[in-house]
Image: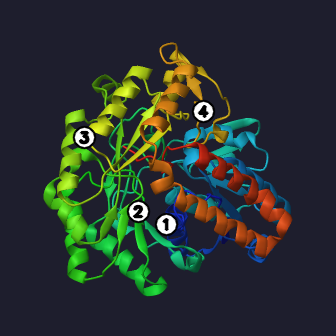
Amino acid sequence: MQIGLVDVMDKSSSGNGPNVAIAALSGYLTANGHEVGVLDVFHAAREEQARFLGSAWGLVGISASSFDFQVGLRAAVEVKKRTGAPIVFGGPHASVAREEILAQPDVDYAIYGEGEIPLLGLAELLAKDRRPQAARLKEINGLIFRDGQDVIVNPPQSRVADLDTLPLPAYRLFPMEKYSEHHITTSRGCPFSCVFCASGAILGKKWIARSPERIVEEIECLIRDFGKKTVVIVDDTFNLDVERVKRFCRILLERNLGISWLLMAGLRADRTDLEMLQLMKASGCRDFGIGIESADPGVLKRIAKGETIEDIARGIALIKQAGYRVSGSFMIGNPGDTLETVKRSFEFAKSQALDGVFVYHAIPFPNTKLWEFVEQHGHFLRSDYTNFDKHFAEPVFETPEFPRSDRVEAYRTAQETFPDVSLGRSDRLPIARYVRAFVRRLRDEGVRAAVQRTGSFFMKRLKSAARSRIGTRVPPAA
């Protein structure tokens, strides 16, 4: 079967590299005999989009986070209109929204959790029967579908127990020349239970890791086929197994690859030792942050971070000892937070002499404990979570002990306390990416499309940069 996979992720502020989930799915499907095409909407010119929409797809999959879901829906409408192919949604939003996705008439199926086995099962079923009976669809774990007026959510698909058995991601299907970074994943899942994190709903709580040897093999293939670029590891939890990290670094040094690599989601401070950090630095790791979230012991306990403030301070000291700059991210508004606890976090940041401080309002999503907390103890100030943004300067909910006015003051206090962080270290790169996106769309689609699709948001970013002093990196996960 010919299967089209669409990535709608906005790469202007989340790293310019291939979608690792779609790359893994592509490798798995092609290894099982299917013909796969990939469309990266962020980088695709009109001609590329036209070719994709003119292909005879038997199935089209769209991967989207909640942030990108509305873009994904527009893509689904266009794909359905132009190709008539059945549409299956996957990615983080499908895992948190579940049956809500099928309220959209242009979406035929959704897959939650790990996608390889359910997507292959759906493709092989549709190859035999374009309109399969519900009884056959119910055999595919992890699938969501319609049975008449009912939406059926099948039981979850069991996790892939050995990630090394999966084929390498099919990066050759991506416009690799358009990416400034190589993105890879070295593990799946997270055993921690942070109330604000949807990782458990997306991939599960069991942490399953690839071997260091397999990871380095993938990096070597990327360098050989597409040139040497910064390697970005996009795991939710990278350093759960300290000895695995050390082995990975030693292999990089033995192979003398000479790469630079970094972590998109940060490092857990309580899973570090000096040897690991020194090996990371020697093998080319140049950047990562720490997800501190709060320096208040009561808040840390309530958000189930699994770390104490003493663990975090010790980790910061070790990172500095290893010769790294240290940045930390904090959240405003988690359970137990008040204006006083947030100010306590800022005092901790100053006491640790952090090189970068990034502050975010807590953003709740369905199937997280933070969402349940807001429903039971708070009040949503915004209702449509598909329009939430991790860089909101305004809170999306409030509680009696931490009303909106106090949350706004907390954010303002962050601006005043850390006046040089945003313009000095984090806003320049996203703005540069918006400039590149604008120029690319101007070239490919004309002035009107460039202004409509990029210009207004670019201007918003410029104004935000002028007003704000708060970092805008993606907050590290647990």
First in sequence, mark 3 or 2: give its number.
Answer: 2
Dividing the picture into quarters, in which one does residue 335 lie? top left
The answer for how far apart the CA atoms under marks 3 and 1 are is 34 Å
The answer for how far apart the CA atoms under marks 3 and 4 are is 28 Å
The answer for how far apart the CA atoms under marks 4 and 2 are is 32 Å
> Is residue 215 left or right of 255 when viewed as pictured?
right
First in sequence, mark 3 or 1: give its number.
Answer: 1
**SS at circle 1:** helix
**SS at circle 3:** helix
**Number of the front mark, 3 or 1:** 3
Three-letter code for the amino acid on which mark 4 is drawn: Glu
Mark 3 Cα-neighbour bin, 10 Å: few <14, some 14–19, many ≥20:
many
Q: Position of residue 89 (x, y in %)?
A: 64, 52
Q: Residue at x 41, y 65 (%)?
A: 232
Q: Position of residue 150 (x, y in %)?
A: 71, 35
First in sequence, mark 3 or 4: give its number.
Answer: 3
The answer for how far apart the CA atoms under marks 3 and 2 are is 25 Å
First in sequence, mark 1 or 4: give its number.
Answer: 1
Instruction: Name the residue carrying label 4.
Output: 394
Dividing the picture into quarters, in which one does residue 30 lie? bottom right
C-beta proximity under 8 Å, tags 4 and 2: no
The answer for how far apart the CA atoms under marks 2 and 1 are is 10 Å
Instruction: Name the residue carrying label 2.
Output: 185
Instruction: Name the residue carrying label 3.
Output: 312
**Number of the front mark, 2 or 1:** 2
